[in-house]
Image (cartoon, helix red, strand yellow):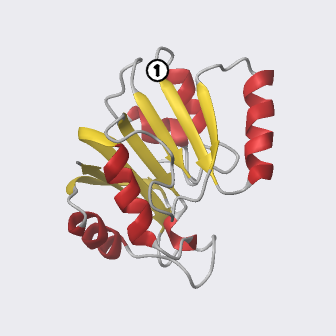
Amino acid sequence: MNSFLNPDEVLDTLNLKPDMVAAEFGCGAGGFTFPLARRLEDGLVFAIDIQESVLSALKSRALLENIVNINVIHSDLERPRGSTLSSESLDLVLIPNVLFQIEDKDAIIKEAKRVLKNNGKLIIIDWLENAACGPLGKRIKPDEVKSLAEKNGFKLEKEFRPGIYHYGLTFLK
């Protein structure tokens, strides 16, 4: 296990197929978007964030690295239909290090459910409560995430440790 969050190690644990369609909600600089796009060479990855500046940098990096299967969406995931994606269109939604900073956590989970196909996977990674680094005071406990997801119709598939500062949860729609 890597001491910090390693997207490739997390993605190694998933049964990814090259033609899958996925999204990183709250993608920031694209920590998961780029490793995912490289693996889903016949698929598509939606990079969604509310901050235009990070999306602009992400677009530039995708051009520089000649990665053509990333679709960038500027959007507020806390709004109804916030991702702007079609219902039941995705195989996988990743929400890494995002829930701790979202006011309406229920809304982002509802949006993930709306866009995921039946049996699609939702991966949530966030900061451990007692992690020595990371944001202070706003962390969300794994049990809170589990009840939030289960309340919205997700079934917990597995728990994992993506690094010493994070927990990971895989849910099935």
Left or right: 154 in relation to 29: left
At label 1, which amino acid type do we have? Gly
Q: Give percent across and percent down for residue 54.
A: 75, 49
Q: Give percent across and percent down for residue 84.
A: 51, 46
Q: Can residue 116 be seen in this view?
A: yes
Q: How many labels does the image show?
A: 1
User: Picture quarter containing residue 33?
Assistant: top right
Residue that sits furthest to the bottom in the current view? 137
Q: Give percent across and percent down for residue 69.
A: 58, 22
Say which element carries label 1.
Answer: loop
**Residue at coordinates 33% horizontally, 76% vertically from top-left?**
144
Left or right: 114 in relation to 172: right
Quick one: 3 or 89, which is closer to the camera?
89
Q: Which residue position holds label 1?
A: 43
**Residue at coordinates 63% horizontally, 70% vertically from top-left?**
134
User: Picture quarter containing residue 91?
Assistant: top left
Q: Is residue 32 visible?
A: no
**Residue at coordinates 79% horizontally, 41% vertically from top-left?**
56
Residue that sits furthest to the top in the current view? 42
| In this view, 121 is above or below 155 | above
| In this view, 132 is above or below 111 | below
| In this view, 150 is above or below 81 | below
Q: Give percent across and percent down for residue 67.
A: 67, 20
Left or right: 22 in relation to 138: left
Quick one: 91 or 168, which is closer to the camera?
91
**Residue at coordinates 24% horizontally, 52% vertically from top-left?**
158
Mark 1 nearby-residue class (10 Å; few <14, some 14–19, many ≥20): some
Quick one: 56 or 125, which is closer to the camera?
56
